[in-house]
């Protein structure tokens, strides 16, 4: 996926009100940009680090500029625009990059399903079975020892974790997928790794113990677990490589 608007570069000043980030521009001016990511963004930015944004050219928006990429605390690059992962995974399925998910005829997004009032990110139908794909944006890189984080920046193992904060919603999605498998469908958790330093994915037991336990339970129940890394540069972003998931 090529970026619709050219990326511009600034330096990180501060984040506030969940959606707002102030950047310092090369000409010395400051600019407030909108961030679609309302999560913790743990280890995804550093004060004074590089940040890339684009101008929507939409005069109706109060903040027409949107944050796209950040320099992380480990010196890598992360895509923190949470509107991207579902599109990236759908694109990679449609162009054949994701070999595991090719038995389908119709791809739909945001379809209501389940017992807990959920919407599945991607529904693949028309094949031998319906395939329910739940996409998880994965950008937390850190090294842990005995289940606890080491000092920030010590990330030489390339381990990415999900979630980056306690998430009942993520656990709910696992329960829904287990139910879909019980009903005879395929259920898939798809970790969309939008961080250039992550080489493998693990459940963040040190952050959300319940999610880690439930992810292992889901695998035992037949839910499939996939992870793919994104290629990220100033012009485009796309999924290109499967990564191991270690439980």
Image (cartoon, helix red, strand yellow):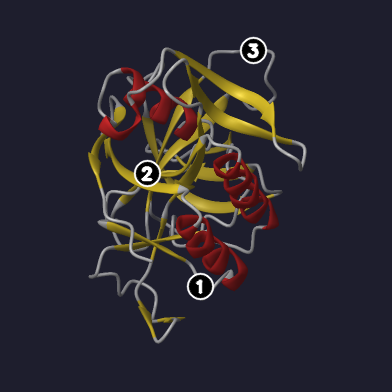
- Distance from disc 3 to disc 1, alpha carbons, whole Å, reads 44 Å
Work out whether 45 lies above or below 111. below
Give the residue furthest to the bottom: 146
| Disc 2 crowd, CA 10 A, few/some/many (<14, 14-19, 20+) | many
Please tell me whether residue 69 is drawn above or below residue 7 in the rendered image.
Answer: below
Pair 3/1: label in front: 1
* Mark 1, residue position: 205
Residue 109, quarter of picture: top right
Report the quarter where the C terminus lies.
bottom left
Q: Secondary structure at mark 2?
A: loop
Cβ–Cβ under 8 Å for marks 1 and 2:
no
Out of 179 and 166, give the one closest to the viewer.
Answer: 179
Q: Dot 3 lies on which element?
A: loop
The picture quadrant where one finds residue 57 is: top right
- How packed mark 1 is, by other alpha carbons closer than 10 Å (few <14, some 14-19, many 20 or more), is some
Task: Name the quadrant containing residue 140.
Answer: bottom left
State the separation of the CA atoms marked 1 and 2. 20 Å
Point out the tag, 1 or 2, that comes first from the N-terminus: 2
Quote the CA–CA distance across marks 3 and 2: 29 Å
Q: Position of residue 141 (x, y in %)?
A: 37, 62
Query: x, y (%) of residue 64?
Result: 59, 23
Residue at horizontal 26 percent and vertical 22 percent from the top = 96
Instruction: Name the residue beneath numbered marker 3.
Output: 59
Residue 212, percent from left and from top: 52, 67
Residue 194: give its label: 2
Instruction: Say which label, 3 or 2, has the lower sequence index.
Output: 3
Q: What residue sits 42% from the left and 46% below the top?
A: 224
The residue at 34%/49% (across/down) is 195
- Residue 10 drawn above or below residue 236: below
């Amino acid at each position: 996926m090529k970026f619709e608007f050219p990326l511009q570069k600034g330096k990180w000043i501060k984040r506030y009100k969940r959606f707002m980030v102030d950047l310092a521009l090369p000409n010395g001016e400051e600019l407030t940009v909108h961030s679609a990511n309302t999560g913790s963004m743990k280890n995804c930015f550093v004060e004074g680090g590089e940040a890339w944004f684009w101008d929507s050219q939409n005069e109706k928006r109060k903040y027409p500029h949107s944050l796209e990429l950040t320099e992380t605390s480990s010196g890598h690059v992360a895509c923190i625009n949470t509107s991207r992962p579902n599109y990236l995974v759908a694109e990679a399925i449609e162009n054949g990059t994701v070999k595991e998910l090719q038995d389908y005829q119709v791809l739909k997004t945001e379809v209501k399903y389940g017992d807990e009032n959920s919407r599945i990110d991607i529904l693949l139908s028309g094949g031998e079975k319906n395939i329910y794909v739940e996409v998880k944006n994965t950008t937390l890189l850190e090294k842990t020892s005995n289940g606890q984080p080491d000092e920030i920046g010590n990330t030489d193992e390339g381990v990415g974790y999900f979630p980056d904060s306690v998430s009942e919603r993520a656990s709910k999605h696992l329960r829904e997928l287990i139910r879909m498998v019980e009903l005879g469908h395929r259920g898939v958790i798809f970790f969309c790794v939008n961080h250039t330093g992550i080489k493998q994915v693990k459940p963040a037991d040190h952050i959300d113990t319940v999610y880690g336990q439930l992810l292992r339970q889901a695998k035992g129940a037949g839910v499939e677990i996939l992870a793919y890394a994104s290629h990220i540069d100033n012009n485009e972003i796309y999924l290109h490589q499967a990564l191991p998931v270690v439980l």
